[in-house]
Image (cartoon, coloured by chain):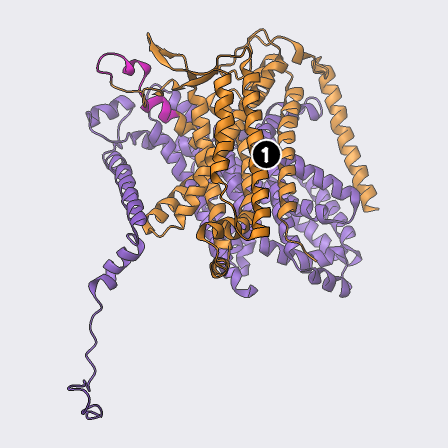
Chain colours: A purple, B orange
Amino acid sequence: MSDTHAQSVAYVRDTFIAEQAPPTREAGAVKWLRENLFSSIPYTILTLLALFVIWQLLSGFLPWLFGGVWTADSIRGCREVLDGARGGCFAVLTERWNQLLFGFSYPSSQYWRPTLALVLLFVAVAPVLFPDLPRKLLIVTLLYPFTAYWLIWGGTILVPLVALLGVVVGYVAFTYAERRGFAIGLLAAVAAAAVVWWMGGLAAENGQFLLRLTPVQSRDMGGFMLNMILGTVCVSLSLPFGILLALGRQSKLPIIKILCVAFIEFVRGVPLITLLFVANVVLAYFLPPGTNFDLILRVIIMITMFASAYIAEVIRGGLAALPRGQYEAADSLGLDYAQAMRLIILPQALKISIPGIVNVAVGLFKDTTLVSIISMFDVVGMIRGPILASTDWNGVYWELYGFAALLFFVTCYGISQYSQWLERKLATDNR
Amino acid sequence: MIQALALAGLTLVLGWLLSNLTENLARSGLGFSFDFLGRPTGYDINQRPIPYDAADTHLRAALVGAVNTMIVAVLACATATMLGVVGGVLRLSGSWIVARLMAVYVEAFRNVPLLIWIIVVFTVIANVLPAPSAFRGDDPAADMLLGLIAVTNRGVYVPLPVLAAVESQGWGWMVVLGVLAGSALLTRALGLWAARRQAVSGLRPRTWPAILAIWALPLAAALWALGLSWDLPALRGFNFVGGLQLRNSLIALWLALSLYTGAFIAENVRAGILAVDRGQAEAATALGLTPRRTMRVVILPQALRVIVPPLISAYLNVVKNSSLAVAVGYLDITGTLGGITLNQTGRALECVLLLMAFYLTVSLAISAVMNLYGRSVALPER
């Protein structure tokens, strides 16, 4: 080997050179910096600009955050403590903590109830959100609406218990009567539930004091709790309505189709605020004279209408994305419309629509702040109204709005991260 | 059968609601009529794009509000598009830190309610910007930008163009718009001519000097003939006079809507750019297209197919979200018709109906444009 070129070349290397470390500019942090921050002159300029912007933002924000005052009884107290130094007046958060979260008229001895309801909410949605959890947890989900109602509004436990009993009896009736057809099953379920509710209503009137929690009026709900209540209730109610509307819009029956299209396009064409005006001042005209139900209930009705139109459009997208073969396969198996939808079409269409539904849910949750415009005291309403109007805290804008923004950011960002995780998880089995 | 049942049920419910309505209206002694629209309002609107005073009718007030809605919506759409395109492109840029910064911008605005942003921007303007008095004296604490624009906590004062040679400003500006439309038509004709030349000779004639002339010369001539002059803002006493005052409420609403919608548009733009296959650009380069032509005839048309539909629905959302103006006291149609007029006359039903009709008309018009566009770019399918 070594004398192959002995005649032509003076020296030929016959051993490998030992491996060497790459040049510094091609390895480690330097390489990363070169490729990701300073790869060309325009990018270098952009990077430097971005660093400058970040420096400006942080140099203003960090001293304000860390130099803040957490205990004082008013804005003047804050100013005294700060004595001209830069810092936030976070004392308003500690002093008005309960008002920001629960509003100003929820009885303070009962704060544990909404807090417990919130904790249970996480337990209840977990099996829905994470399909890997044991299916038995779904029972908690089923029981949750009734528990939460009892915890937040209080009163005797008989009311939610009767409501639950009605649902259970209705379901049993449905499973028995379904063999005669879906429509008959549905009718039987409604009838059975109505009977239970009617009888239970009589019982509840007599049993006012069974396991009684201090009742709280709807108008006493406020703060971030109100946003959470409106968000959760309206999203969960609008799902079934949205599915029905989407099916109606896809249906071959012209009258039902026209009705659904008209409803969806109307609701999507007007701003939510006009629907809230309807809830606030117009809805009363359409109800029998003398009836007067809660503003919060009227608002829930209107927001649910609003959300269901948007969810219907998302689900319509899911239905349209299914290959025609799925519909034809269901038909060829001899399934009727209800069976085909329930067993074949909807499970797949809903799966495709989950990211869209989550987007609608996030948007809706943010939109619950609009109720502050019709003078309900959600977290924004609390800040704009009682807190900033009080002489103690007049002028503490950044801390309060920053806190509200943080609450929403954490919730909405969390939900959208979940949706992306789910999308990745579901994407695997489509390939 | 099911249809008949549904229809019967719906008629029953509607009938019940309507009978309740007539009974309630009869009880309150209001009746259902739009007469109130013809009565004088007695309230003032601080931003009047068209002539209006307190003696004018409620209908006129609603009209002023509608114009105000459209003003803020158009302004916000324009700036949101710019922000969104810049944000979307920068988020894909080769500078890691710029991309991260844009991600933070997008997430911060997408996950916090618009209402909070509007109020925050409004508070910033009112508390951080200098008062007009800061511009006074020999050594003022604040300066006008370029000596032309005054940014104060009472609003931003900008120079107002005035057409001195005509009686009615409105007609004068119509003429200017007409000239611009003519230029656009000529540009289009020139483009078609250039395409024909290219088809015949294989060479595309250089058109940009002609295009520049087509736009600049007629415009300059028209403005000169109409006697364009500028009304500059100037400090008199405690406040600025002259020029055009953009009120805090308008600026806050405009900025917040642009930033918020811009974040959504940035995501659309990013998705649109990512949706164009890399091979498309490579194929165009292989065919010998210049980078500019590659962008213009290969990448953009395909990216726009993905970007435009959500862009138009973002515009739709801007129009609807502009109704949050009530939170900062900007008198758009929700503030006039749905706010002051409703409270003054007590005609809740009629006002809300008109309000919904307005928004519905605008929305349907915008979706009609969207459908037209969708049809024009749809891939021909078998």
Screen quadrant of the C terminus of chain A? bottom right
Image quadrant assignment for residue A156: top right
Residue that extends furthest to the front in the rendered view of this protein: B201
Q: Residue at x 77, y 65 (%)?
A: A332
Q: Which residues are magenta?
A: B123-140
The residue that label 1 is drawn on is B185
Q: Is residue A334 left or right of residue B75?
A: right
- Position of residue A270 relative to residue B380, above or below, is above
Along the line of sight, which residue is nearer the eye, A276 or B296?
A: B296
Q: Quadrant of the N terminus of chain A?
A: bottom left
- Give me the chain letter of mark 1: B
Residue situated in front as seen by the camera: A423 or A219? A423
Query: At which x and y percent is residue A225?
Result: 47, 36
Residue at point 45%, 53% (across, down): B290
- Element under label 1? helix
Q: Is residue A105 left or right of residue B379?
A: left
Q: Position of residue B171 (x, y in %)?
A: 57, 17
Of B290 and B332, which appears nearest the observer?
B290
Q: Is residue A128 left or right of B116 when viewed as pictured?
A: right
Q: Nearer the viewer, residue B149 or A309?
A: B149
Residue B116 at what x, y percent from top left? Answer: 43, 32
**Which quadrant of the view contains residue B28?**
top right
Q: Position of residue B367 (x, y in %)?
A: 63, 38
Q: Residues within 10 Å of mark 1 (few under 14, many from 20)?
A: few
